[in-house]
Amino acid sequence: MTFVFLIAAIISEVTATLSLRMASQDGSDKRWLAVVTVGYLAAFAFLTLALDAGLTIGVAYGIWTACGVALTAIASRILFREPLTKLMIVGIGLIAAGVLLIELGAGH
């Protein structure tokens, strides 16, 4: 269940962040701000549940942020046609490698 909570936290956070972009694009539609608020609240609630289920904060936060960065960059490329250069992809890979090293170093 630990990683189910963490995946839910990641999806909630990415949804909120992408909705924040939508809210700034379409300032007249305040419904996006509700999605932002609910998304971030859900993300922290699910992250709390993952921690309560036994995931350490270093590992949980590392995975949460790395996945959030990667998924947000990819989704913003698809949804908003924002740049996703080769250098940015290398950076995402380095973040993933760093999180993997933290996970391995945690020595479960």
Image (spheres, helix red, strand yellow):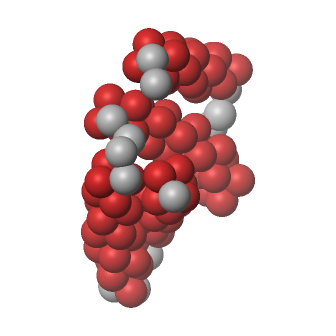
- Where is 76 relative to 86, above or below? below
- On the image, the x and y values in percent for residue 50 come to 38, 53
Q: Quadrant of residue 26?
A: bottom left
Judge from the rendering whether residue 101 lies leftward or rightward of residue 61; answer left or right: right
Judge from the rendering whether residue 23 lies leftward or rightward of residue 70; answer left or right: left
Q: How many marks?
A: 0
Tell me, yes or no, if residue 18 can be seen here: no
* Residue drawn where x is 46% and y is 59% of the image: 5
- On the image, the x and y values in percent for residue 100 come to 55, 20
* Residue drawn where x is 35% and y is 69% of the image: 42
Q: Quadrant of residue 45?
A: bottom left
Judge from the rendering whether residue 95 lies leftward or rightward of residue 34; answer left or right: right
- On the image, the x and y values in percent for residue 59 come to 40, 31
Tell me, yes or no, if residue 23 can be seen here: yes
Instruction: Name the residue nearer the viewer: 87 or 105.
Output: 105
Instruction: Name the residue nearer the viewer: 42 or 85.
Output: 42
Instruction: Name the residue nearer the viewer: 100 or 65.
Output: 100
- Where is 93 relative to 5, above or below? above
- Where is 102 relative to 28, above or below? above
- On the image, the x and y values in percent for residue 40 come to 32, 64
* Residue drawn where x is 33% and y is 81% of the image: 34
